[in-house]
Amino acid sequence: EKYRISLKDFVRDKKRKEIISGFGVVSFYIRKKDNLKCVVKKTRNGITDEASQRSFYREIEALVKCVHPTIVPFIGFCVEKKKWYYCSCRSKKWVTSILY
């Protein structure tokens, strides 16, 4: 429960386009309380079966534990209107600048 968030605490960054991926839709948001730039990933379809829900929570547990310079910090997750979301900090650098 420590990592539960609400999308009401974020405002969409309309300067950035959404990106459609295999997982779902990636959108850019700004957290209202501190203007932190974030990436919010929304599942393409609602996760209704128990196995998919367990998989989602396992992914959250893994993201919480990841601490590495090339992995953006995990902020939290939420389930709203049958859609599942998780939120990470937006990197200040392009991935290629970190890797090369």
Image: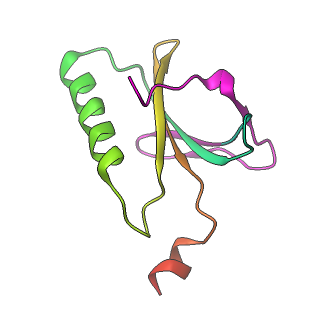
Q: Which image quadrant is residue 23 in?
A: top left
Total count of labels: 0
Highlighted range, magenta:
1-28
User: Can residue 43 be seen?
Assistant: no
Residue for point 41% across, 19% down: 46
Residue lying farthest to the right in this orientation = 15
One can see residue 61 in this view: yes
Depicted 80 relative to depicted 2: above or below: above
Residue 11, position in %: x, y? 74, 33
Query: Can you say whether 55 is above or below 62 in the image?
Result: above
Q: Position of residue 12 (x, y in %)?
A: 73, 36
Q: Is residue 19 left or right of residue 77?
A: right
Q: Position of residue 21 (x, y in %)?
A: 48, 46
Q: Residue at x 46, y 13 (%)?
A: 82
The quadrant in which residue 66 appears is bottom left
Q: Residue furthest left?
A: 51
Left or right, residue 73 beside residue 56: right
Q: How is the image coloured?
A: rainbow
Q: Between residues 18 and 59, which one lies in front from this camera angle?
A: 59
The percent position of residue 57, horizontal first and vertical second, equals 28, 30
State the quadrant of the N terminus. Answer: top left
Q: Is residue 56 above or below residue 36?
A: above
Residue at image position (47%, 24%) is: 78
Q: Residue at 46% x, 25% y: name it.
A: 4
* 13 within the magenta span: yes
Foreground: 71 or 96?
Answer: 71
Q: Is residue 20 magenta?
A: yes
